[in-house]
Amino acid sequence: MLQICFLNCIIAKASKRTLMNKTEIKAKDGNIYYYTTSLFNAENPLGIIKATLTEYSLYKNGGEILIGKLYKTDEGNWYDLPDNNPLNPLLLTFIKMAIDESEKTKPFVDA
């Protein structure tokens, strides 16, 4: 389990459940990226789950190289964990926009 402690001392643990296969997106920078999603539980130090986020693992070069992770709430808001993400903030914005667009075009399946 991955544990990250951030400013308000909530510990986040990644679940092992993958929600979908790799999805291809094209960002405004012209590059093609891929992402997978999984559930990500944010817990307090006592182990109580405070939020469940969707974790987007970002890949490049045919989906082989992991370049970073993004997090989104159920309400559709992006949530940034202070994980020293090496990606340019503008590039992250372009990727978030491309993910939002790709999710608008996907049919919704309630499981």
Image (tube, rainbow, N blue to C red):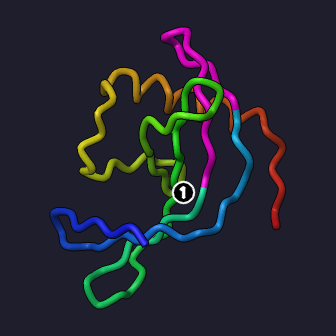
User: Residue furthest toward the front?
Assistant: 64
Closer-to-camera residue (66/88): 66
Of helix, strand and loop, which one carries label 1? strand
Determine which quarter of the picture holds residue 5. Answer: bottom left
Q: Residue at x 53, y 28 (%)?
A: 97
> Which part of the image, by quadrant, shows the C terminus?
bottom right
- Residue 86, how many percent across, how many down? 29, 33
Q: Is residue 33 magenta?
A: yes
Q: Total label count?
A: 1
Disc 1 crowd rating (10 Å Cα; few below 14, some 14-19, many 20+) is: many
Q: Is residue 64 magenta?
A: no
User: In the displayed structure, would residue 40 be above or below residue 81?
Assistant: below
- Residue 36, how many percent across, how many down? 63, 46
> Which part of the image, by quadrant, shows the N terminus?
bottom left
Determine which quarter of the picture holds residue 74. Answer: bottom right
Judge left or right: residue 2 versus residue 44. right
Closer-to-camera residue (106/84): 84
Q: Residue at x 54, y 57 (%)?
A: 54
Residue placed under numbered mark 1 in the picture: 54
Determine which quarter of the picture holds residue 70. Answer: top left
Q: Amino acid at mark 1?
A: Thr
User: In the displayed structure, would residue 32 be above or below residue 46?
Assistant: above
Q: Which residues are magenta?
A: 24-37
